[in-house]
Amino acid sequence: MLICKRANIAFVQIPKNGSKSVRQALLTSFGLDHGPVARDRNWTVEEFEAAYARDAVDYIPGVENNLDHLTLAVYRELLPQAYAAFRAAHSFALIREPRERFLSALLQRLGQFQELNGLRVDDPVVGTEARHVCEWLDGRGIFNDRTYIHFARQVDYVDLEGERLVDMIFPIERTDAAEAWIEGLTGERIAIAHEHARREPKKLGKVLYPSLRRIGRSVIPPKMRDAVHPIWRNSPLFDNAAKRYAKIDLSPAVEQFIQHYYAADFALYREARAQRGGAPAIRAG
């Protein structure tokens, strides 16, 4: 959750929903207020920012995840000052089509926790992992397990105990509507970059990827590697993975599970697409 005190805006970050682009836009335009969460932990702002910079996952006892991935229930229970700041602000979130998000989360999980990077979405290991994840999710409500958090339901980030707490929701493909809404509130126009698309190697890229990755890790210095990585990913050897998501043949059991487990998210996405964004929310009090 991101609090912009100067603009009185809170952005609720949902895993796999383009949060990094929004974070950068808000940081650039308004700055971020880390005071409430720092006070919740009895830290100085400087201590919090140092922990965030190193991606610390242990600054909230009993919770594996960092602040980017916490649900509203966790904020209310463990970070009451940050939760109060969210409730006092105009809040918004980006919502993504659930099946597409599930496939993107599979690739994220395989790369981040199993070091299977450079996979194409039609790789058999993706289907195998999909079945495993569905078995793990089956019957679970709200959770915060770090290795599965990208599969958390989006509704748990905007609703709490059946009540909608986030003022505005926008489909991830309509960041222009979010920009207009923020401009209506603040009088300032921000620019949210479209950098959330996952890239996958084309067939030739898949063949070359392992060798080039080994060479890059062993020869190129880390800072240079970080600079080159976006150029490499945007090269003709890669394409946007989402272009093929609809054509991926998941098993009937997995497809049925996605429709059932994320039923509220499908409804949320339809709601986000149907609403007319751009007008400031009217807040009582």
Image (spheres, grey):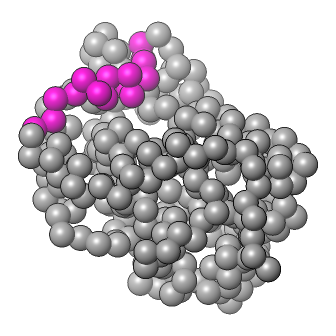
Query: Foreground: 222 or 172?
Result: 172
In terms of image quadrants, where is residue 8? bottom right
Position of residue 38 relative to residue 119, above or below, is: below
Does residue 72 lie above or below 185 as drawn?
A: below
Q: Is residue 17 visible?
A: no
Q: Residue at x 54, y 62 (%)?
A: 68
Q: Position of residue 160 (x, y in %)?
A: 47, 75
- Magenta residues (range): 237-251
Q: Can residue 259 be seen in this view?
A: yes
- Of residues 66 and 72, which is closer to you in this image? 72
In the picture, measured across the screen, residue 211 lies left or right of residue 191, that is: left
Residue 112 magenta: no
The residue depicted at 56 percent of the width and 27 percent of the height is: 230
Q: Does the magenta stretch include residue 246?
A: yes
The quadrant of the image that shows the N terminus is: bottom right
Front in this rendered view, residue 56 or 125:
125
The spot of residue 231 in percent (x, y) is: 57, 21
From the viewer's perspective, is residue 69 above or below residue 20? below
Q: Which residue sits at x=83%, y=49%?
A: 184
The image quadrant where one finds the C terminus is bottom right
Q: Is residue 58 above or below residue 133?
A: below
Q: Where is residue 81 in the image (x, y as percent from the top left)?
A: 68, 85
Residue 225 appears left or right of 263: right
* Residue 47 x/y as whole percent: 71, 76
